[in-house]
Image: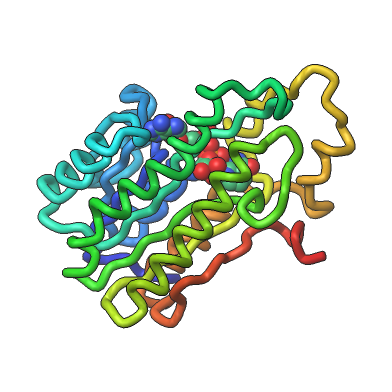
Amino acid sequence: MSSLAGKVALVTGASSGLGAAVARLFADRGAQVFGVARDETRLAEVFAEVPGGRFGTGDIATAQTCRSMVEDCVGAFGRLDILVNVAGTHRMRRTGDVTDEDWAHDLAVNLNGPFYLCRAALPHLLENGGNIVNVASIAGVEGQAYSAGYCAAKHGLVGLTRALAVEFTAERLRVNAVCPGGMLTPQVTGFTLPDGADPNLVMRVASPRGMSGPEEVAAVIAFLASDDASAVHGAVYLADNGKTAG
Ligand SMILES: NC(=O)c1ccc[n+]([C@@H]2O[C@H](COP(=O)([O-])OP(=O)(O)OC[C@H]3O[C@@H](n4cnc5c(N)ncnc54)[C@H](O)[C@@H]3O)[C@@H](O)[C@H]2O)c1
């Protein structure tokens, strides 16, 4: 079991689904966790099960909020070793119905926010030999119907991961991405399909092996964030029950 003892981790999306599972697991493995999400009540509920954890609310679509979150984490724990960009949003729409605001929102939350957080965290991570795990999706490596903005942003997040991995190859920093397939979280249970959506197109995202629990994907993230993964840098790590295997 990969230890995270002595590490300080900033985890976004920590109020729900995968982010909450990551916060709990990281604390179990010995990390001090600073959680970020929008809903203070839900964050407080999750962090009742994250010993020693701290949290802050904010919208990661704003660069200043991301800078403040990193400063608050370092203010609370004195350092930052691991950034886990989990927060994301996915609303299905027919492409012709996507407004300028919808498109901007998809990119702001799923791509801009992770970039702002990476940029703000970099000096701390470089100082401590830390690492970044970006949660992309199989939508970052293949197309999904009714999801143009989400797919574009998640492909962008995979590209951001690889660009940072190359830029910092010779430095004390690892950067990896995880691409989950279907996970049973509020994001999925709350899906609404566009009117008249073709179910055959929607079901192309499914693996015959079914969906993962968020805890299963959190375990992959804990490994990548730990020193056990010291040789893993620039990886785009599929946790999709074989969905994209061919
Ligand atoms: N559930 C799936 O099937 C699935 C599959 C592949 C990838 N993913 C990705 O996994 C990640 C976690 O998703 P989940 O399934 O746990 O979803 P979720 O809806 O349960 O949780 C999303 C989290 O992101 C936070 N968030 C959303 N917008 C935010 C914003 N603007 N600012 C700050 N926080 C914000 C929410 O507060 C929440 O904590 C996302 O990046 C998602 O795209 C999910």
Q: Where is residue 91 shown, x and y percent of the image? A: 62, 28
Q: Is residue 58 left or right of residue 201?
A: left
For this view, does 161 lie left or right of residue 97? left
Q: Quadrant of the C terminus?
A: bottom right
* Residue at the farthest top position: 195
Left or right: 71, with 9 as reference point: left
Residue at left 28%, top 38%?
63
Q: Nearer the viewer, residue 10 or 228?
A: 10
Instruction: Give the tally of numbered discs.
Output: 0
Q: Is residue 17 visible?
A: no
Q: Residue at x 31, y 82 (%)?
A: 170
On the question of residue 177 being in view, the answer is yes
Q: Quadrant of the N terminus?
A: bottom left
Where is residue 120? Give x, y as percent.
23, 51
* Residue located 72% across and 33% down the image: 146
Q: Is residue 235 left or right of residue 68?
A: right
Instruction: Tell me if residue 187 comes above or below residue 208 in the rendering.
Output: above
Q: Position of residue 156 (x, y in %)?
A: 52, 52
Q: Residue placed at 34% from the left, 30% from the top?
A: 59
Q: Residue 193: image x %, image y %? A: 74, 24
With respect to residue 44, does 73 lie above or below? below
Q: Quarter-wise, where is residue 122 in the image?
A: bottom left
Q: Quadrant of residue 186?
A: top right
The colour scheme used here is: rainbow
66 or 133: nearer the eye? 66
